[in-house]
Image (tube, rainbow, N blue to C red):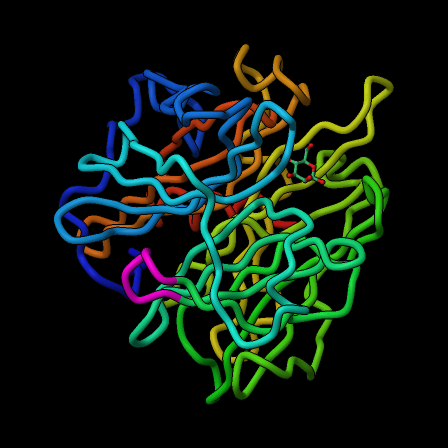
């Protein structure tokens, strides 16, 4: 029995695995939980991040609006299923107007580290890079320095310092739709200067695991278990109809998280339901957040569907770790 290191979350959104279901990660039967038009001006709500908050949940959501401008918004929920969104995007404060200047913002992740919540996102600064901000209350947000030079996407912080340093996995990219992409690890003493970059893993460009043959990128904040960091990540196949985004999982060493212990050869979830296959960008499942209950080992994964709506899927730490061990690359 593997153990999640963390807090109990008795009110985690949950549905038991349906009988005769052969999936390791199974979908909520009322997906999508968030429709495209639930925010005042939204064209789509997807690739978003949630955390526990008081007796409910809070999150930062990617809402593209009807000008197709990409920005991030606070949302609140009692049960993690039904969400209410602010009308206006997050306004960031900070000392340097150069950093506060907004080009675009998308694909947020949220994590509590020590006394505050950090938000990371894909931040336009002469091309995509990783924006970082912190908040105590989801009302005032202070923007820090961008973590890296452009071009980079999918900056995902670990939920605690590792060997005394803040830690992040990310995916260097290009200015466009990036026909490549491996995952790297970086550390920082102060959330300003990032370095000691280490290669974590790359694509599998052959028949063993073709769902991740074009590019990969980290998804939700890594989950600490007694056996290692459990990281869900997306992988892309370049089909004759364009990119197909699925997701799998990797277990990283606790003290040296650039070392891979197990990595799923088959995907855990791929676009198969109509709301995952049809939308503004067809055939995309893109996880950006996971809630965990250390007591039961339950995991609830929030994922963007077809760059249009938001879905929820479930697994347990035992289901996923056992599967990874038996089906590892
Ligand atoms: C990636 C990002 C994601 C998006 C995906 C599929 O490059 O832009 O936001 O979900 O492509 O379009």
Check if residue 200 falls in the magenta segment: no
For the record, the magenta segment spans: 135-140
Q: Residue at left 48%, top 35%?
A: 303
Q: Residue at left 87%, top 19%?
A: 240
Q: Is residue 239 above or below residue 326?
A: above
| Depth order, front residue of 117/201 | 117
Check if residue 136 falls in the magenta segment: yes
Residue 225 appears in view: no
Question: Residue 100 sits in which quadrant?
Answer: bottom right
Q: Position of residue 199 (x, y in %)?
A: 73, 69
| Depth order, front residue of 115/22 | 115
Q: Position of residue 88 (x, y in %)?
A: 43, 40
Residue 313 appears left or right of 183: left
Q: Is residue 126 above or below residue 268?
A: below
Q: Residue at left 35%, top 49%?
A: 317
Q: How many marks?
A: 0
| Depth order, front residue of 75/272 | 75
Tell me the quarter of the image containing the N terminus: bottom left
Residue 26 appears in view: yes
């Amino acid at each position: 029995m593997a153990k999640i290191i963390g807090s109990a979350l008795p009110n985690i959104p949950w549905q038991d695995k349906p009988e005769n279901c052969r999936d390791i990660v199974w979908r909520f039967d009322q997906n999508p939980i968030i429709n495209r038009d639930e925010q005042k001006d939204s064209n789509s709500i997807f690739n978003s991040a949630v955390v526990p908050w008081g007796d409910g949940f809070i999150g930062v959501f990617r809402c593209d609006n009807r000008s197709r401008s990409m920005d991030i918004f606070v949302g609140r929920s009692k049960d993690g299923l039904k969400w209410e969104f602010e009308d206006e995007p997050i306004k960031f404060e900070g000392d340097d107007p150069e950093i506060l200047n907004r080009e675009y913002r998308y694909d947020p992740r949220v994590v509590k580290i020590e006394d505050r919540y950090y938000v990371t996102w894909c931040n336009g600064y002469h091309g995509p890079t990783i924006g970082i901000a912190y908040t105590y209350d989801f009302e005032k947000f202070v923007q820090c320095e961008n973590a890296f030079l452009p071009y980079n996407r999918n900056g995902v912080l670990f939920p605690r310092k590792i060997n005394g340093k803040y830690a992040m996995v990310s995916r260097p990219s290009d200015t466009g739709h990036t026909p490549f992409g491996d995952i790297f690890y970086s550390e920082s003493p102060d959330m300003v200067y990032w370095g000691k970059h280490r290669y974590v893993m790359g694509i599998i460009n052959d028949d063993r695991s073709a769902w991740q043959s074009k590019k990969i990128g980290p998804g939700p904040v890594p989950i600490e278990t007694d056996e290692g960091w459990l990281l869900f990540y997306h992988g892309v196949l370049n089909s004759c109809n364009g990119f197909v985004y699925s997701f799998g999982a990797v277990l990283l060493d606790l003290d040296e998280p650039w070392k891979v212990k197990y990595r799923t050869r088959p995907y855990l979830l791929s676009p198969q339901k109509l709301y995952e296959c049809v939308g503004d960008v067809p055939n995309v499942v893109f996880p950006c957040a996971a809630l965990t209950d250390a007591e039961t080992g339950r995991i609830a994964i929030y994922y963007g569907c077809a760059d249009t709506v938001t879905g929820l899927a479930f697994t347990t730490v035992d289901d996923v770790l056992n599967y990874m061990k038996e089906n590892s690359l």
